[in-house]
Amino acid sequence: MRLPVFDLHCDTALALSERADQYTALRSNHRHVDLTRAGELGGYCQCFAMFTTPDFDKWFGKPVTEVFDNMLENLEKELALNSDIIARAGSAAEIEKNLAEGKMSAILTLEGPAGINFDAGRLEELYGRGFRISTLGWNEKNILTGSHVTGGGLTDAGREYVRECQRLGILVDVSHISDEAFWDIMEITEAPIVASHSNLRSVCGHSRNLTEDMYRAIVQTGGTAGINLCAPFIKAEGADFNATCDHIIRMLEIDPTGRHVSLGGDLDGCDELPAGFVGIESYNALADRLLERGLDELTIRNIYWHNTMGVMDRAVRNHKK
């Protein structure tokens, strides 16, 4: 089934910046995401994460802020080179406009604010550059929050960061943070919350996944959870399309409206995908499997496109208030 795809998270920006040759161009490459294969979908909007962690100083031998700047500059260059088929977007209305004109859409997001020194004062600038989603960290403990690895709740600086994001209209993303920090955010949120690339812990017992109560809380905010395609977060062993569907189906059982589950593949950020999923083009095959598992086409279309569009629209309207 060929549907439009709105994917809440990929690490393609970092993957493209690691090398600067024809094989890491956005239009066509050997990784999980490129625009040529995305053309096989019925439409496409991709959230491109600028992933940073304080460990980058050791990993890359240069300041994390420099890695962030280079990554963003490179992605913006790639988007400009491919402006005939993809355009920037900052709202649901702009995504719909691009789709109507036959173009894909690109949204910028922050996965870990280490690249901006965890500085909430930089968020307004980034909003102006097109950033619309931000986590508070990755797997480390930082000045904003603890992670699912380290534990530890939201700090005062973290609360300030959440409030500034929501003041601007940047969606707060709870992927990677600790359970304690998740509930701390739920106590202060005034806008929809997203878990851009997080599955269900009841289906696969990994700490990166959401508990069912966490998912219910996200639903109550009007937010969404994006299905992560990293195999270890789908099933401990033998992850495949059916195991991926199991997470979606359980989310639909928890929330029968079906309006709060989305896609967040973590493509180009996974060492292993479920068997049969090779890249962005495989979303068509996953839709077919969901249909075989008993979901109707409208529900699948909502998961693939309309649910995330709704959250984007609510975030913009919240910002206008």
Image (tube, rainbow, N blue to C red):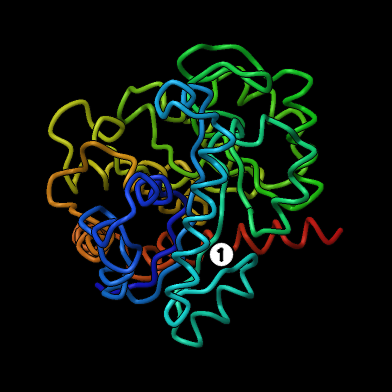
Name the amino acid, label 1. Met
Front residue of 210/107: it is 107
Does 236 appear above or below 253? Answer: above
Residue found 55% across the figure and 60% down from its top = 107
Does 185 appear above or below 166? Answer: above
Instruction: Give the position of the N terminus as an image quadrant.
Output: bottom left
Q: Residues within 10 Å of mark 1 (few under 14, many from 20)?
A: many
Residue found 46% across the figure and 30% down from its top = 210
Front residue of 223/265: it is 265
Across the whole image, how many numbered discs are drawn on residues? Answer: 1
- As drawn, the residue found furthest toward the right would be 321
Q: Is residue 249 visible?
A: no
In percent of width and height, residue 134 lies at: 61, 42
In percent of width and height, residue 187 lies at: 74, 28
280 lies left or right of 277:
right
Q: Which secondary structure lies at badge 1?
A: helix
In percent of width and height, residue 188 lies at: 77, 31
Instruction: Give the position of the C terminus as an image quadrant.
Output: bottom right
Query: Quarter of the image holding residue 21?
Result: bottom left
In percent of width and height, residue 160 lies at: 80, 30
Q: Label 1, on which residue? A: 309
Front residue of 255/176: it is 176
Residue found 26% across the figure and 66% down from its top = 28
Residue found 41% across the figure and 45% down from its top = 14
